[in-house]
Image: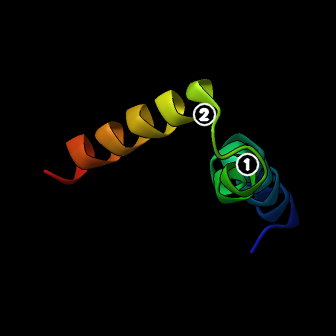
Amino acid sequence: MNPDLLDIIGRSLQAVGWVFLPVLLTPLLCLFFPKRQALRSFLTTLIQTIDGFNM
């Protein structure tokens, strides 16, 4: 494969990882801040969005 193409693919995957990092850290946020209403609202919205994609 072309090294430039591999570089583009690697940078794209890295960008996707940075975008999804807050979603992956939500379990830790729930452990440290279990009573936060904003976090609970975010998680409810996230769950509804994922359920919408799965239907």
Mark 1 or mark 2: whose residue is earlier in sequence: 1
Spot the residue most to the left.
55
Residue at 49% across / 40% down in the picture? Answer: 43
Residue 39 falls left or right of residue 13: left
Closer to the camera, 37 or 46? 37
Q: Residues within 10 Å of mark 2 (few under 14, many from 20)?
A: some
Q: Position of residue 27 (x, y in %)?
A: 65, 58
The disc labelled 2 sits on which kind of residue? Leu
Residue 41 falls left or right of residue 12: left
Between marks 1 and 2, how big is the CA–CA gap? Answer: 8 Å
Residue 20 falls left or right of residue 55: right
Closer to the camera, 33 or 13? 33
* Residue named by callout 2: 39
Q: Position of residue 41 (x, y in %)?
A: 48, 28
Q: Position of residue 7 (x, y in %)?
A: 85, 58
Residue at 40% across / 37% down in the picture? Answer: 44
* Residue named by callout 1: 29
Spot the residue most to the front.
35
Closer to the camera, 15 or 33? 33
The disc labelled 1 sits on which kind of residue? Leu
Mark 1: which secondary structure? Answer: helix
Residue at 40% across / 31% down in the picture? Answer: 45
